[in-house]
Image: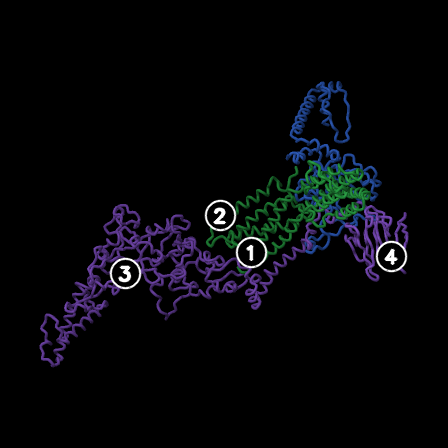
Amino acid sequence: MQQLVIRADECSQGLDRRAPGVEVIHGETIRLEGAAFKALLSRWPDVQAKMQSKARDLLAGQSVKVQESPEGAGDLISFLVNQGVGEATDVLLIDETLCVRCDHCEKACAETHGGTSRLDREAGPTFAYIHVPTSCRHCEHPHCMKDCPPDALRRAPNGEVIILDSCIGCGNCETNCPYGVIQMAVKEEPKPVNLLSWFLFGKGRAPGDEIAGHHDAGVAKIATKCDMCKDLAGGPACVRACPTGAAIRVSPEQFLTVTRGTTLDRS
Amino acid sequence: MHESFLAYRKFFYLKLGLGLIVLSIGAYALHDPPHGPNGGTWLGYTLGTIGAGLILWLLWYGVRKRQYHSNLGQVSGWLSGHVYLGSALLVVATLHCGFKFGWNVHTLSYVLMIMVIVSGAYGIFTYVRYPTRLTDNKGGMAIDAMLKEIGDLDGQCLRIAAEMGDKVHQMILRSIERTSFGRTPWRDALGGVGKGLEDLAREIKSIAGDAPTLAPLPGAAAPAAGGESTVFFVADQFASLRDRAKAALGHRLLDLITSKKALVMRVQRDLVYRKLLNSWLSLHLPLSIALLAALTVHVVTVFFYW
Amino acid sequence: MRCLLRAVVRRSRGVVSHQDRGFEGDHLTIGRSTDQDLELPDLRVALHHATVVAAGPGRFVIQSAVPSGIRHNDEPVQSAFLAVGDQVGIGDHRITVRPPEGAHDLVLEIAQVRADPGQEVEKRVASASGSGPEKSLRLGVRGWSWILSLTILTLFFVVPLIAHQSEAMQGFLRGIIPGVSDHAWSTGGLTEGHRYFSDDCNKCHERAFVSVRASACAECHEHQPHHFDVERFKVPTLADKQCAACHKEHGGAPALTRQDEGLCLDCHRDMKETAADSKLLDIEGGFAEDHPEFRATFVTHVEGKDRSERIEIDRREAPKERSNLFFPHKSHLDKTGLQGPDGKVVLDCASCHVPEPGGRLMAPIRFEQHCHRCHQLTFEIDDPKREVPHGHVGRVLDGLEAYYGLRTLERADIDTGEPDVLSRRRPGQQATPPERSEGLESAARRARQAGKELFEYRACATCHQVDEKAQSVFGWDIVPVRIARTWYPLARFDHGRHATVACADCHGFRPADCAPSTLPPFTLNRGVADPEKGAADCTKGVADSEKSEDVLIAGIATCRECHGDPGAKDRVQSTCISCHGFHVSPRFAMDGRERIQPGDAAPPRQAAAVPSADLTDAPAGQDAE
């Protein structure tokens, strides 16, 4: 939408397009004939005025943001985009200057999701101390949906990609996902945790421990991935459980805010 | 957008802790009890209750941390409170006892509390210092990838060493066998395998360089403790060796050993950092349970012999 | 040895086949070189890596020939005994020791282990990344937590608690290992006086979870006096007060007794509320500003009766003492000296005023000690050494009668002014009864005359006030002398602690005719010798006092020159109990009972003036010099 406005505005000013636009996601470009558009705008001058003022505001806002963003922020954003984070509606990021590698995010995910963590903290690349662990990006164009026989992968109304219970555990989605976020988990309810007896005697399952048999072949499994803890009051368990505040969930619009808080800004 | 637990909600708990400290000091300064300040004055009882409540709440952090379903605030908020109010506890407890110490169970619980707070302060220090260093040390490479790379380098070293003679081969074998991590944490911290590799490089130089009377080239520094200077020194040596082929092999071997050493140092450092991020807890946790026991004894005995 | 070497070959589809080879010899060489008995073609094996030798019948040992060693059951070693089931790793080969078969006494199964690079790598890292603190301690966090907390609970709680129920154990613990007894519960040291029983906490802490009661203190402090007459006054705030309200132990001596002014002011700030019919004045604050002017205790004579009254020392009309004695200090302290029996004598304060043993108060003036040297009670010129006793009128008159009677009967040469009936007799002739009685009557008359002289003109009359009352049996009555023993009986003053202060710095007076319109507080500043100053506030020194009714005692302003409130920087820090006592009632004890039972001797007159000895030692820091 932004790109459309800029182009239209420049057209209306009779200028050639000067600012190249980078597409973050797969988008569709509509080409309008400049003269026809100009004629349209002149027929409705108040529409033209509205468009021009909106364009001006957007430009002004963007340039401020760009000026304020530190050096190298562009690099960080390209890194994030290359990781497919731009595709996502919501992604988990870990600030490695705060992360003490305690794995509480994994334990929280496992504990709130039947004993298997959908998050692998260590895996994933890092750039400028921002680490992208393997967690679902809830892509605009989900690759996992391509080959699901029972059609168990759907998108929820709020944009999240969810796996329904009809999953048969074929593993196609796991293969297809370019980011490796889908894991095949054992279909088994873990034993409940008795915190008191665990604290006192170490008896029973430790909170956050994953079910044994995770890696064995031949055990019935279903596909699992991050579901943004949509069923939990309070939101993502990983963010809630991170002691140092390193784990955050962002959507792409908030990238600039994120980079502002990183070491790039601190230097 | 994201903030460190220390800055949680714009340092809310820091302000709270400071406020508590200021209030306690103010009350203590204004209060002039007839028999001198001690735990039995009304202010002593108040501060003692606050302190005991604080200790129980601080201990509860360990429970809340593991209640992954809980929605009672965020764990980073709890940690922020834990850190700042735990520090304020130092002041509260000291003023509670009116600086009266002795060889008794009450001072024992005070001392345990001090140890808990100090070990926790060190913990904060590690939490602030080491995460960045961990990432820097990895240099974009995963640890598993580094270990795999070390394995590959080992294989290459073996192939070359087999051609250089049995003595060199045995030395390389020994070096590979001794390359392990984490068995003895102190060995890792003090240089460990990396140091062994330096010695290895030195030995290879002396083996590969047949001529015992190799004069040092002008300008080259004598081998110092650092592996780098050893490597450079040897590299200079090799330039004048008679057996070119053997020299070339030795050169290549040294390259491999240098790369391996760099990787090994990284892995070791990674392990050391992770250990540091955790080892303080082995003091902090048992001491805080001991503190709980001592606190219970303190409170009960104070009222037992009221 | 005879050895069977079995090579295990894994073919496709999981099929396993063996290749057997026999070996006979003293030692079996293992290595990469082709000349080895057991050739292992792996770069991680040295040319000659290890040797197996027999070490006795049926026992074999494998020895490494290279520094890198071998792995025996995953332990890196240089040599090891081979037992059935052992696994030796050399390079990527695994040699398993099997039970002997047939003629072979050693069977070795050799397999090549295809190591997964990932697992290979994991093996190298003994403790994986992210290891918790569990692995740092052998016992683990939980183990140490249990150990520490159980140790603390046992040693410092359970054990002393059990001992609390068992006398023998209690004694043992307290004596031998006090650290594990209830001594560990003590919050501080005891005061000196309580240390001799400090071993036994239960002497004071009688019951668990109950604070120390007065009944515990009463074991030794049973007769501790109360503060006031509980029959006359009812003060609800002091009823049922425990000793611990003011006396706290376990803080050392400074903390034992409450020192703060609040202790007293809480009640004495408003006496109407505390005890409505008390005559005590209210005091608002500390000594320096708010303590009222001292009120000395005077004996006054009202309506024919002697009464004691407290009169402010600095009233406009200078207070007068009615001691019924004539004593001018001025003439006695004459610097030029007095004519004594042995020559000129110059008197000073110390000539008569001597501290009693202990140094607190001055010893009472005694005629026999201090006055008699000059003031002799002679009555007869002809017998200058003879004196009447210093005593009751009756005794004096009896004495005179007896004297004169004796002299008369002895026919002494006494000029009585009367015809000497008895002297005109022949020697050897006994006096007749009528003569005797006449002589005695004359002696009696002589005695009476002498007595009159004494009582009305000289000797007794010099100092005493004599009352010529007709009703009196003897005709004269010496008005009883009422000298104040202690001007301020409700306060403690210790002359001994003020030994460096000159008498004149505190003792002086304001003469009766001194009444300028504005009077500064009655104080004898140091340097009263300064006549200017003396004139300004018309105070005078003792040496100027001509009348015995002058009250020569200091008022509060004099004390305030040196004494101030607690916390004062330029004064001696004094609090209420520096001078006043709490446990001062002569009659009642703290538990409300009477201290003196009927039939006991009357309490010494000075009981009210002299509080119990331990309170006179002002604790360190409060009234330190």
Of discs 4 and 1, which sits in the foreground? 4
Task: From the image, tell me which residue sits under label 2.
Answer: B29
Labelled pair 4, 1 in contact (Cβ < 8 Å): no
Marks 1/3: CA–CA distance: 59 Å
Q: Is residue A172 visible?
A: yes
> Residue C394: where, in percent of width, then height?
21, 70
Q: Disc 2 to disc 4, how far (Cα)?
A: 92 Å
Query: Which residue is painted at 50% across and 61% down in the image?
Result: C212
Q: Between C624 and C92, which is closer to the camera in this rendering?
A: C92
- Contact (Cβ within 8 Å) of mark 2 with mark 3: no
Can I make out residue A223 in this image?
no
- Circle 4 packing at 10 Å, graded few (<14), some (14-19), many (20+), is few
Question: Left or right of C433: which side holds A5?
Answer: right
Sequence order check, earlier mark of 3 and 4:
4
Q: Give the CA separation, mark 4 to mark 1.
A: 75 Å
User: Mark 2 packing: few (<14 Cα in 10 Å), some, or many (20+)?
Assistant: few
Disc 1 marks which amino acid? His
Indicate the secondary structure of the residue bearing disc 4.
loop
Q: State which chain disc 2 sits on.
A: B
How far apart marks 2 and 1 lie (CA) works out to 23 Å
Rendered colour, chain B: green
Q: Nearer the viewer, mark 1 or mark 3?
A: 1
Q: Earlier along the polypeptide chain: callout 2 or callout 1?
A: 2
Residue type marked 2? Ala
Question: Which residue matches tag 3?
Answer: C483
User: Mark number for residue B106?
Assistant: 1
User: In the picture, which chain is purple?
Assistant: C
Query: Do the numbered discs 3 and 4 sit on residues whose CB atoms are within 8 Å?
Result: no
Q: Colour of chain A?
A: blue
Amino acid type, callout 3: Ile
Element carrying mark 1: helix
